[in-house]
Image (cartoon, rainbow, N blue to C red):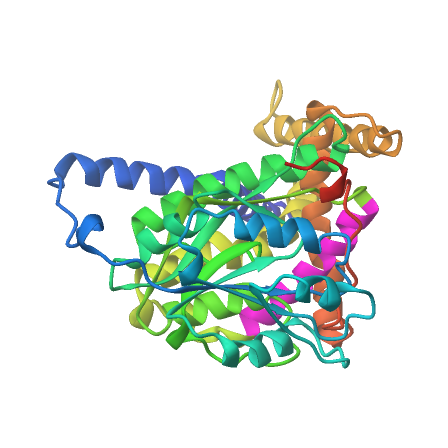
Amino acid sequence: MSDVAVPVFWICAFIILYSFGGYGIFLWVILKIQQLFRRKEKPSYSESDSPEPKVCLFVTAYNESAHVRQKVENSLALDYPKEKLQLIWVTDGSTDDTPDIAATYPQVEVFHQPERKGKAHALNRGIAFVKAPIVVFTDSNTLLSKGTIRAIVREFRHPKVGCVAGEKRIANDNSSTPVASGEGLYWRIESWLKKLDSRFYSTIGAAGEIFAIRTELYSELEEDTLLDDFILSMRITMKGYRIAYAADAQATEFASSDAREEMKRKVRIAAGAFQAIARLPELLNPFRYGRLSFQYFSHKVLRWTLAPLSLPILLLSGIYLSFPTSVPGLTVYQVATVLQLLFYLFALFGYLLQRRNIQSGWFFAPYYFTLMNFAYFPGFVRHLFGTQTVLWEKAQRSDSFHEGFS
């Protein structure tokens, strides 16, 4: 039995270390080596000679009346010529005042229908009204940094860039819940990894809070699509374009109000992740997509599939290999098992502390990591049986724009 447990332990250890750190370190080293041997090239375009294209800021919203005014005013305050900024709101199914409030602004084009069919349907319907060569997608519950549009347009000056991913940030103020600590840390790490991905070849996927595409590259989405931002952006890379990363294009939102709300959100995302893998099988062909396939597999597929599964297997195989042993002193399996048990003990403390709304990075980061990976198991079950509805229930957030978010 130990003959099987030993390779299983080391394979799982490699998958976990590579997925949650090794891949990023590998990219960083490769880019540093390339930097030593690559001559600094001048860009093939001149920013001063490039005209400012018309841009459409596209928002899909469902019952977001509490956020509409501040979102629209934030959009109108962006540093971009007003005559070149088209504002579209698609409010399918909203039963509150969302479309009426948005329509009070003459700069906003509102396209409402009473039937709610999900975000993918709203995107497919609304894209027909876009009158700009670049469309920027953003959520109604996020605020954009002033220079967001200019940062995005700058990346599109490269002809092989078909999509631009912005930077998602989690608001961190005195009212933030413990969930914000874990989610904020996650997105700081993810942002660093996206920058490396972009420099290596292409960012892998985009966050729906802020990303943009060339309008002509839009592909109609299946109406049951869960991760519309990811599938839409990755299908653009399959057409031979890159996803660039614009760190100065920033969208800020509040974290989920508590771990239960965050768990609901993560399970939905996990179900969407498995759906995306099933719908993008060609991306796993390195003979066709080369570096893109390597990045997609390393950054997303491993993290969505084998890495969560490897966590419990690593712990169980480590326990099995730890006892009994004839080797004097501590073995590597015993040390690894003790460290894992301590990590999950910290996660348990994080769970207990979050119930009291007490922040502690030492305990909550392990808890958030454990919660995030555990979510892939029920998410897989929902995908397998098709029980995840496209009409996502919004997660309650820890705060609201009108309560002082700036």
What secondary structure prevails in the magenta region?
Answer: helix
Image coordinates for residue 158, horizontal then vertical, percent: 25, 58
Observer-nearest of 267 and 101: 101
Image point (63%, 79%), residue name = 121
Image-quadrant location for residue 356 = top right
Q: How many marks?
A: 0
Asked if residue 323 shows in the view, the reply is no
Span shown in magenta: 260-278
- Left or right? Give the position of 324 relative to 107: right
Give above or below for 406 relative to 379. Answer: above
Asked if residue 360 shows in the view, the reply is yes
- Left or right? Give the position of 230 relative to 296: right
Identify the image quadrant of the C terminus.
Answer: top right
Give above or below for 395 relative to 35. Answer: below
Q: Is residue 266 magenta?
A: yes
Image coordinates for residue 171, horizontal then vertical, percent: 65, 36
Observer-nearest of 56 and 332: 56
Image coordinates for residue 286, horizontal then vertical, percent: 34, 67
Observer-nearest of 65 and 39: 65
Image point (74%, 32%), residue name = 176
Image point (54%, 52%), residue name = 76
Q: Is residue 209 magenta?
A: no
Give above or below for 362 relative to 119. Answer: above
